[in-house]
Amino acid sequence: MRRRTPPEPVQVVKQRRDATLRALVEGVPYIQYLGMQFERRGDELTGILPFDQKLIGNPMLPAIHGGVTAAFLEVTAIITLSWSYLWEDVESGAIDSTTLKDGGLPRLPKTIDFMTDYLRSGLPRDAYARARINRSGRRYASVHVEAWQDNRQRLFAQATGHFLMPTSRD
């Protein structure tokens, strides 16, 4: 009879998940510039864009710049998509977070097209976004992203993007 290896302690798995997400996010300088963060609950991610005065495009309203809004949605889609295909390796322990920190990041999906719908002005406050992967194959993925501020039911922007997935040898 073959002996089963005991499961890893929960805190070890949690640390590996958090370290992998942190390495993925910190590997993109533009995410740092915008001040974006990601909150993880299991395999679900929420993008967070903390308010900063530099994000304002129209000081008369004031409103978050449209380019910042689109970038926030696109980055949320790319990180969520990357997280989804890394999840299995993170769970199995095949991904070593120290290797990721030292520049061993996997390639990110490349944007084919990205269409943003601006539904209302982004107010000068924190914003949140979640992406839903509609289709993800070996070569192509389709993702829908929604952004809100105070009320999840009251979106201020949404987007749909199509992405070229990295090949396994990348």
Image: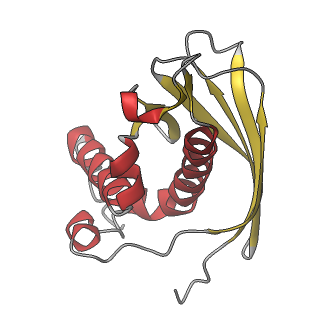
- Residue at the bottom extreme of this rendering: 169
Give the x, y percent position of residue 75: 54, 51
| Residue 40 appears in the picture as rendered | no
Look at 76% across and 70% down and name the residue there: 140
Look at 37% across and 72% down and name the residue there: 105
Q: Nearer the viewer, residue 14 or 111?
A: 111
Q: Nearer the viewer, residue 45 or 26?
A: 26
Q: Above or below — where is 62 with respect to 91?
A: above
- Residue at the front extreme of this rendering: 60
Give the x, y percent position of residue 108: 53, 69
Look at 33% across and 56% down and name the residue there: 20
Quarter of the image that includes the N terminus: bottom left
Q: Above or below — where is 157 with respect to 62?
A: below
**Quarter-wise, where is residue 34 in the image?**
top left
Judge left or right: residue 151 versus residue 40. right
The colouring scheme, among rainbow, by chain, secondary structure or one colour, is secondary structure
Give the x, y percent position of residue 30: 41, 56
Judge left or right: residue 115 versus residue 81. right
Judge left or right: residue 41 versus residue 163. left
Give the x, y percent position of residue 43: 51, 42
Look at 50% across and 60% down and name the residue there: 88
Q: Nearer the viewer, residue 39 or 61?
A: 61
